[in-house]
Image: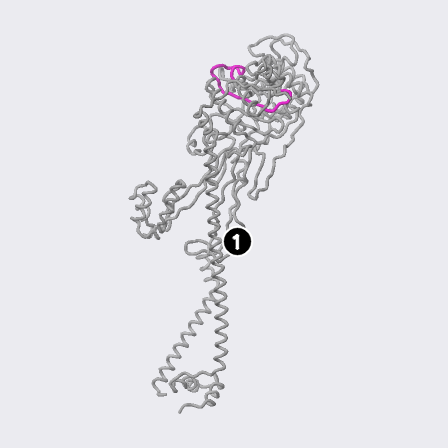
Amino acid sequence: MPPSRADQRGGAERGCGQTMSGFLEWATHGVKRGRLEFRSRPMVVLTVIVVVLALVAAVYLMLVSRTAAQGRRIEQLQTEIFRLQRENEQLTVEIAEVTSVLQLKERAAALGFATPERLEFLSISE
Amino acid sequence: MAEGPRRRLALLITLLAGCAVLTVAQLIKVQIVDHRFYAHWAEEQWIRAIRMDQPPRGVIRDRDGCLLAGNGVRYAIEASPAYVIDHHEAAKELASVLHMPASHLEAQLSSRDDNGELRKWIRVSQSVSKEVGEQVADLKIRGVTVKPLWRREYPERHLASHTLGFATSETGYYGVEGFYDAMLQPEPVEWVGPVDVASAPVPWEPIAGEFPRRGVDLELTVDRTVQALVEAELERALQEYQAASGTIIVMEPETFGILAMTSLPSYDPEEYPRFLDEDPVPFEDPAVSKQYEPGSVFKMVTVAAALDAGVVTEDSVYHDEGWIEVGGQAIHNSMRKVYGDQSVADILVESLNVGSAWLSTRLGADLFYEYVQGFGFGDVTGVDLAGEVPGQLWLPEDIEHWHPSNLGTNAFGQGIAVTPLQMTVAAATVANDGARLRPHVVRRRIASDGSVSTYQAVFEEQVIDPETAQTVTDILVRVVEEGATEAKVAGYRVAGKTGTAQIPIPGGYHPEDTIANFVGFGPVPDPKVVVLIKLDRPQSSEWASHTAAPTFSRIMVQLFTVLGIPPAGGELAAEVGS
């Protein structure tokens, strides 16, 4: 014979003060009936807590993932900055090499220019 | 409920409860009791010192912004053999790009440590070009990484190598690189934080600190065009006069900024390791780090001091008997010539040792050395180059070294050792109306944030009055026009003095070898450049008037052209008109 609802409530209210057999009686009453039975009020509280915790966890996860995504983006930008910096420095050196005095002299000579043997300054009157 | 299931359920619940208690107990142990131990252990694994990519070293440019020292990119090829999946295939692919034997690479990639495990890290290649590095990166081989490295490069190669110095991947040595090393160094950003399995910072942790800053860029007073022409002339002089080595300095007398400074033999700063085995290594800048006895060029200091002190005038006359005794030592003129009555101006024009010694004795030791020190001898000039030496000047209080005869010999540049830069500074002081400034090489510093610091001239001392400086200048013009005529420059008035110095050796002076030097400035009366020529052991002629003086003339002609200094008096204009 399954216990009445009043008996169930009373059993739960007696709670931890009960003996092991009483506790088992209370814990297994649903089994006896072929299905688990829970009291509705604690279930609601529990559900609310779980939902709130889940929401908090979801928000936290979202924030962490966004931070990580931003961090990754910053990292990529930094890598790009360093890459461009390297590119710039290398190009600066290469430009300096092709416009070096030695290169210019060689190119000038190849184009037929020569060092003047005599210089003349012209006095330009008004 | 039957007794059996009930008992089993009770047992199950008891077991689960026991497990829960054990779990909670373990959690309490791990999280509370042994918290410190585990926290420390965890930190050891995932907290690391993280260093952001190194920004480049500051660059060095000439006064027109032309790059003299910059930063090229090289790559180090590294690998983690433990993470490489197919060592054979990886070695094959790398070999095709690195042009190294595949077998050697495979052996490297399969190398194991003392425990018999694949190594965590190996360096496959120390330094490869940018192109090769990028090709390796494009292969995307798992476990092989390409690490960019900065390499100091000097696009003008040998040009101004002594002035620039050189830099390894970490430190600058000699010249500007050495003197300004701390400033040229980039500011690395390093912090301690969590890393992932690849030792990269985790992306959700904010980066501590600022973005790393590159080193400070330097702009020199050096003009690369002037530097190049001076180097070409020095090379020509060494060949033409068969000199062993030499130095040329070009300085602006208004600011004491160095326009060009070169010494031969020199070296390619980019290839500095090749010169490490040479004896002596050519890294020291002879212009500031090596001293020599200047000889007769020093007479300009003696004459300037005597005129400024008022012990003589330009026209004062003394009787030259060909020798004079100072401190018990007889001092003779060159070739033991006797000149008879001579003026103070003649002492410079004829380059008289006896006259110089006569002047220094008229001044007295205290006053003479006061002027010598005033011109900057016996101490470093304070130029912003690494390795400057003070020269050697014994004063009367140095009782172990100074002898009363020094007063006579020092007057014509013997028994005193100076650096080429000190001698240039002394001449620049005369050209600058007697005011000595501090010589310098860097004229602007540009920080990574774009802020610019401009060099402010440092006034050292008003050594002689402007009137005295003018008088000495006029005498030095006479020296060129009447004595060292090979230094003349058509269309311009230039001032200068030759010096053929003996080379001290243990027990006396070298019987044959000399140092030929010439220091002068022009155009007079408004000098724009001071030039010092020093040729060591010229073989074609021992006399500076035949070697250093014509070199001075050739350089001045080109300098006036390059710097846009027109001739005085319309001499050439008239020529063109005719």
Q: Nearer the viewer, residue A83 or B435?
A: A83
Q: Position of residue A61 (x, y in %)?
A: 47, 64
Q: Position of residue B413 (x, y in %)?
A: 58, 19
Residue type at mark 1: give it. Ala
Q: Is residue B87 visible?
A: yes
Horizontal placement of B536 versus B315: left or right? left
Q: Residue at x 35, y 82 (%)?
A: B8
The chain containing the residue under callout 1 comes to: B
Residue B527 lies in the magenta stretch: yes
Q: Position of residue B286 (x, y in %)?
A: 51, 27
Which of the image's four quarters has the C terminus of chain A? top right
Which of the image's four quarters has the N terminus of chain A? bottom left
Q: Is residue B107 visible?
A: no
Residue numbers of the magenta segment: B524-547
Residue to which mark 1 is pinned: B208
Q: Position of residue B306 (x, y in %)?
A: 67, 18
Secondary element at image label 1: loop
Image quadrant where residue A22 sits: bottom left
Q: Give neighbour class at mark 1: few <14, some 14-19, many 20+ (Cα, 10 Å).
A: few
Q: Residue at x 49, y 42 (%)?
A: B56
